[in-house]
Image: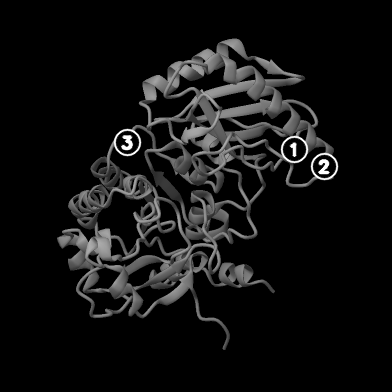
């Protein structure tokens, strides 16, 4: 008998209310340059501090020791799915988040505009984080000029900022394929390759993407800073069990960026649209409180500023989250978990393998007698260092959702 089937057999539907609050890329590392503080330690967080005193703390391994996860695996782990077993392409997630209905055989790629020099080398992987309006203009140009590549229909949809999605819709296509993103500046756009070199459908998809680049890049020539684009997470949609079946809870996603809404939709959460900031996200939780048992709230900006290496801005993003937190706390959810999907240290300007801090609050969590939610305090918390995929089961246990196992 599998562990998941045991959890299912023990589950009690008691109407408990849970909130998973994710500050994306929250974890960080202390360095001499920051007086040996992390942004979480440097931030003024009176509301998190008050919650900490009645909580258990620890650290979460997002995927496996030493593995640096993307946002997809990081969130799937928080949702209780093993990210090493359930692989979802980032393009699929982004497409779903933008409201695109994927058909069998569709290949989706998460793309972002970049800056290229005269030698076609990437000088800025995010094109200076161009505004959404400029992204929409570039996407409109590509969409107008490129309708099909070989026998595949090409669908292009802008996202937020420098991000967009490309769907290749045709017969005999399959993923996953390697990224065209070199993942660092100073290198050319990479050529995508099938992850399964023996799959003819993947080979065909790689060829189509190569031809798409040949058609698209000349259209962007001279349009600095967004005169090129990179693709990641090129894949088709997998079939995985939905959240309500797996956990016997109705779940709502309160996120702003399409990718995170897409991740939530993939596992069967209801996407709540039209939110603009963390205060609105918490307020919407209150408005929907009687309609759902589980609320996933996503705060992007800690990750964004970590990738920029901006310590002060990441610290401010944490303070903004803390300032809005009382909106949700007024409802007193039965269980609150606050964490990140991974760490994004400012010193590294990118995702990392470092376990992210986690706080777990409930009437049954016990107190670790720690006065602040920080990486240092989490190191001594009673939760220890655990895999992220176990967090939701601990949330259910704290909500008294499990019957006793065995005699």
Residue 386 location in percent, x, y?
47, 73
Q: Is 71 on the left-hand or right-hand side of 407?
A: left
Per the image, the residue denoted by label 1 is 174
Residue 260 location in percent, x, y?
45, 43
- Position of 366 relative to 321 (above/below): below
| For the residues bearing labels 3 and 1, Cβ distance under 8 angstroms | no
Residue 127 location in percent, x, y?
42, 30
N-term-proximal mark, 2 vs 3: 2
| For the residues bearing labels 2 and 1, Cβ distance under 8 angstroms | yes
N-term-proximal mark, 3 vs 1: 1
Q: Residue at x 50, y 19 (%)?
A: 139
Neighbor class of circle 3 (other Cα within 10 Å; few <14, some 14-19, many 20+) is some
Neighbor class of circle 2 (other Cα within 10 Å; few <14, some 14-19, many 20+) is few
Per the image, the residue denoted by label 2 is 199
Per the image, the residue denoted by label 3 is 275
Q: Residue at x 54, y 69 (%)?
A: 65
N-term-proximal mark, 2 vs 1: 1
Tell which tag, 3 or 1, sits nearer the viewer.
1
**In-front residue for pair 362/227:** 227
């Amino acid at each position: 008998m599998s562990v998941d089937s045991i959890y299912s057999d023990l589950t009690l539907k008691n109407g408990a209310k849970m909130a998973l609050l994710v500050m994306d890329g929250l974890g960080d590392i202390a360095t001499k340059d920051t007086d040996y503080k992390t942004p979480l330690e440097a931030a003024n967080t009176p509301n998190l501090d008050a919650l900490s005193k009645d909580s258990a703390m620890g650290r979460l391994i997002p995927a496996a020791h030493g593995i640096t996860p993307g946002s997809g695996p990081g969130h799937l782990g928080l949702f209780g799915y093993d990210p090493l077993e359930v692989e979802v392409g980032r393009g699929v997630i982004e497409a779903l988040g933008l409201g695109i209905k994927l058909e069998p055989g569709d290949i989706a790629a998460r793309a972002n505009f970049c800056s290229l020099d005269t030698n076609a080398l990437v000088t800025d992987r995010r094109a200076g984080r161009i505004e959404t309006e400029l992204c929409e203009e570039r996407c409109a140009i590509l969409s107008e000029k490129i309708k099909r590549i070989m026998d595949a229909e090409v669908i292009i949809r802008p996202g937020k900022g420098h991000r967009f999605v490309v769907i290749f819709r045709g017969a005999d296509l399959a993923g996953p394929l390697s990224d065209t993103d070199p993942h660092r500046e100073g290198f050319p756009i990479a050529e995508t390759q099938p992850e399964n070199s023996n799959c003819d459908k993947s080979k065909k998809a790689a060829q189509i993407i190569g031809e798409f680049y040949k058609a698209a890049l000349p259209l962007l020539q001279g349009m600095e800073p967004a005169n090129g684009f990179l693709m990641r997470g090129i894949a088709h949609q997998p079939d995985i069990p939905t959240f309500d079946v797996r956990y016997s809870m109705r779940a709502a996603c309160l996120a702003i960026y399409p990718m995170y809404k897409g991740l939530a939709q993939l596992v069967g959460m209801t996407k709540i649209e039209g939110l603009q900031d963390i205060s609105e996200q918490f307020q919407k939780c209150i408005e929907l409180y009687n309609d759902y048992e589980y609320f996933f709230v996503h705060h992007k900006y800690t990750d964004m500023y970590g990738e920029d290496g901006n310590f002060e801005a990441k610290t401010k993003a944490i303070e903004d989250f803390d300032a809005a937190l009382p909106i949700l706390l007024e409802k007193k959810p039965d269980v609150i978990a606050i964490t990140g999907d991974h760490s994004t240290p400012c010193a590294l300007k990118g995702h990392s393998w470092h376990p992210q801090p986690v706080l777990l609050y409930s009437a049954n969590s016990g107190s670790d007698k720690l006065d602040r939610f920080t990486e240092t305090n989490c190191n001594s918390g009673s939760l220890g260092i655990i895999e992220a995929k176990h967090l939701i089961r601990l949330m259910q246990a704290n909500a008294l959702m499990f019957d006793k196992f065995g005699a």
